[in-house]
Image (cartoon, helix red, strand yellow):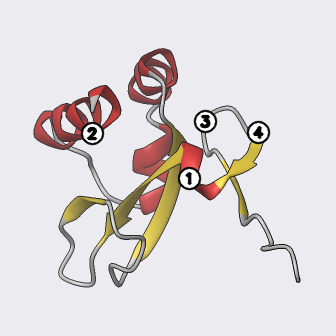
Amino acid sequence: MKNKKIVMRTCTVTKEKLPKSELLRVVRTPEGNVVVDTTGKVNGRGAYIKKDLEVLEKAKKSRVLSRQLEVEISEEVYESIKEEINK
């Protein structure tokens, strides 16, 4: 029986390569909205962030998600990311 390949992605904040399951995808949709993608299938430009509150704070301070997604990120989006991490 074949082993399943573990999909690796890079955290935009820490630059660590981690399994996709340990990361959270944040997407800028074609309409320009920024959403948290729990399914991994939302259309648009995506950025991965480690599921860690310290990494989220670092991302907020350095504005790395704003640069990666090429759009301003509102406080509400950071709150929804925080809620998703705490689940």
Task: Name which residue type carries label 1.
Answer: Ser
C-alpha gap between disc 3 and disc 1: 16 Å
Mark with earlier residue (4, 2)? 4
Residue identified by numbered label 2: 84
Q: Position of residue 43 (x, y in %)?
A: 35, 84
Q: Quadrant of the C terminus?
A: top left
Residue closest to the eye, 86 or 61: 86
Task: Name which residue type carries label 2.
Answer: Glu
| Residue 29, above or below 14 | below
Residue closest to the eye, 78 or 17: 17
- State which quadrant residue 71 falls in: bottom left
| Residue 23, above or below 83 | below
Q: Which mark is residue 21?
A: 1
Residue identified by numbered label 4: 16
C-alpha gap between disc 3 and disc 2: 17 Å
C-alpha gap between disc 1 and disc 2: 13 Å
Residue identified by numbered label 3: 13
Q: Quadrant of the N terminus?
A: bottom right
**Rendered residue at 42%/26% (across/down):** 56
- Marks 3,1: beta carbons within 8 A: no
Q: Position of residue 7 (x, y in %)?
A: 72, 66
